[in-house]
Image: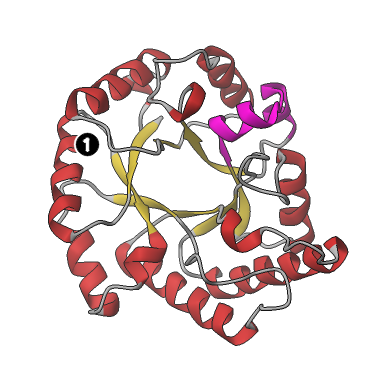
């Protein structure tokens, strides 16, 4: 298993420092926030320069769309969404990202009073436009189900798979996050039902803490991933800045579950 660690784009200087800590802890890749990267004043060239200067490869991105880019409701701007997706795909291709996680509950959530059937059709459109942009980019987008505390649509694994199945394109699959599965009460056994769809795994322990500090059942997660033959990218995503000892402890704990010799 290739292990990664997520960090937001604050400034190029702090990003480089965090990435160095992640590298010293023994992680294999950096898990990057895409939307802030797209807003750099220097555009693609600045993004490429920044990522190529880091001490780890950036194989996976998240924070897929900006917070003000609506995907459901009356304020969807189709041309703006398509333009952003084209930029995101170009950026991912330029820096060699293999996967991008499409969570972004802030953009997907259905506004109060909006018809949910219409919202579903809008999301199918958004995921189809995503496929149009990312086909041929070398980067696969995973639709991420997010729990009820954050999302009011695309909350469950089977729902995310249904959207991916409806779009039916090689560039749009599903990403899972153990934290969201736990908060939503999704049985880990469901992973075994959808092996062909899962392209990335994120993790945090109970309460979005670093792995090994809570009660999340990592052994069962490992068993379910093994049952579908998944042995690729897995990244830590917590909602606060960890200290370097915590980053190292996260990596050490995860390597007790997925030993280094299984990395490829």
Question: Tell me, what colour scheme is on the image?
Answer: secondary structure
Residue 261 in which image quadrant: top left
255 or 80: nearer the eye? 80
Q: Position of residue 101 (x, y in %)?
A: 51, 52
Assign a secondary structure to mark 1.
helix
Residue lying at 26% horizontally and 69% vertically, measured from the top left: 47
Question: Farthest residue toward the bottom?
Answer: 79
Residue 145 in which image quadrant: top right
43 or 260: nearer the eye? 43
Q: Answer with left or right where residue 136 lies relative to residue 255.
A: right
Residue 204 in which image quadrant: top left
Residue 102 lies, with reference to residue 224, above or below; the image says below
Q: Which residue is mark 1?
A: 22
69 or 168: nearer the eye? 69
Residue lying at 32% horizontally and 66% vertically, measured from the top left: 37
Q: What range of the chain is rendered magenta?
A: 176-193
Q: Is residue 122 magenta?
A: no
Q: Position of residue 254 (x, y in %)?
A: 37, 20
Residue lying at 73% horizontally and 77% vertically, measured from the top left: 74
């Amino acid at each position: 298993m290739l292990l990664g660690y997520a960090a937001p784009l604050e400034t190029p200087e702090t990003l480089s420092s965090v990435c160095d800590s992640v590298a010293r802890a023994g992680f294999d890749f950096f898990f990057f926030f895409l939307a802030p990267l797209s807003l750099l004043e220097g555009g693609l060239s600045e993004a490429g320069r920044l990522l190529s200067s880091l001490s780890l490869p950036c194989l996976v991105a998240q924070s897929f769309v900006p917070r003000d880019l609506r995907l459901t409701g009356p304020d969807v701007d189709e041309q703006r969404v398509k333009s952003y997706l084209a930029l995101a795909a170009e950026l991912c291709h330029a820096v060699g990202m293999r996967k991008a996680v499409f969570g972004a509950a802030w953009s997907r959530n259905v506004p109060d009073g909006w018809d949910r059937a219409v919202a579903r059709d809008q999301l199918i459109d958004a995921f189809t436009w995503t496929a149009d942009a990312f086909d041929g980019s070398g980067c696969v987008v995973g639709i991420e189900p997010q729990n009820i505390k954050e999302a009011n649509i695309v909350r469950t694994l089977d729902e995310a798979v249904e959207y991916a199945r409806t779009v039916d394109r090689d560039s749009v699959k599903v990403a899972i996050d153990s934290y969201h599965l736990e908060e939503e009460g999704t049985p880990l056994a469901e992973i075994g039902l959808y092996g062909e769809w899962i392209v990335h795994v994120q993790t945090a322990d109970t309460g979005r803490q670093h792995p090994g500090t809570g009660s999340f059942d990592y052994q069962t997660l490992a068993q379910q991933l093994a049952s579908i033959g998944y042995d690729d990218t897995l990244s830590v995503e917590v909602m606060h800045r960890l200290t370097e000892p915590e980053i190292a402890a996260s990596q050490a704990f995860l390597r007790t579950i997925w030993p280094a010799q299984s990395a490829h």
